[in-house]
């Protein structure tokens, strides 16, 4: 599924993605037939939703570590050790802080919305 996302992120149209899959002889694993444009779009949507859910879980984990009193350096090390990133250089301490701040804002908004109902 990630190949579809890679192609779309590279700026390929749905037709270009479809013909790339045809050229690469990629097939539907269930029935061995070629993958339709509609199936490609469904695969793309599923992969994006999976990545969003994964990012949300990572953000919640970072907030949990921050709330436990860990420094940004400790959080970065723990994330690397847990495999959230393959290389510590991929994310800066500032980016980690931004993720934590953003997730806390979302949590506050959810709590505020829940109390209003």
Image: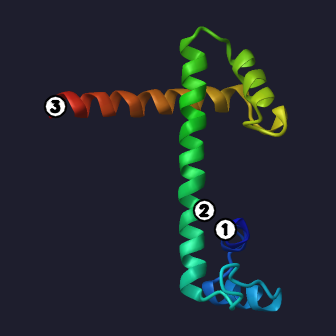
The disc at residue 5 is 1
In this rendering, is residue 82 above or below 54? above
Residue 12 sits above or below residue 113 on the image: below
Identify the residue at image location x=59%, y=72%. Answer: 43
Q: Quadrant of residue 98?
A: top right
Camera-side residue: 85 or 39? 39
**Mark drawn on residue 44:** none
In space, the residues marked 3 and 2 are separated at their CA atoms by 34 Å
Q: Could you tell me if the residues under marks 2 and 1 are in contact, i.e. CB atoms within 8 Å?
A: yes
Q: Nearer the viewer, mark 2 or mark 1?
A: 2
Q: Residues within 10 Å of mark 1 (few under 14, many from 20)?
A: many
Pick the quarter of the image with the C terminus. top left
Query: Disc count in the image?
Result: 3
| N-terminal label among 2 and 1 | 1
- Give the image location of residue 57, x and y in percent: 56, 37
Say the numbered circle drawn on residue 116: 3
Residue placed under numbered mark 2 in the picture: 47
Q: Is residue 55 left or right of residue 81?
A: left
Quadrant location of the N terminus? bottom right
Q: CA distance from mark 2 to mark 1?
A: 7 Å
The Cα–Cα distance between marks 1 and 3, rounded to whole angstroms, is: 38 Å
Question: Helix, strand or loop at disc 2?
Answer: helix
Residue 40 located left or right of residue 91: left
Front-most of 29 and 82? 29
Residue occupying the point 68% across, 80% down: 12
Give the mark nearest the N terminus, 3 or 2: 2
Please tell me whether mark 3 sits on a helix, a strand or a loop. helix
Residue 37, position as x, y percentages in the image: 58, 87
């Amino acid at each position: 599924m990630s190949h579809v996302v890679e192609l779309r992120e590279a700026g390929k149209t749905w037709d270009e993605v479809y013909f790339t899959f045809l050229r690469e002889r990629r097939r539907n694993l269930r029935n061995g037939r070629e993958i339709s444009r509609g199936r490609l779009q469904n695969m793309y949507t599923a992969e994006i939703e999976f990545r969003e859910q994964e990012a949300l879980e990572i953000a919640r984990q970072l907030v949990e570590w921050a709330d436990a009193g860990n420094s940004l350096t400790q959080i970065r090390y723990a994330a690397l050790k847990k495999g959230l990133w393959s290389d510590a250089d991929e994310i800066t301490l500032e980016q980690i802080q931004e993720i934590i701040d953003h997730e806390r804002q979302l949590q506050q908004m959810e709590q505020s919305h829940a109390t209003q109902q």
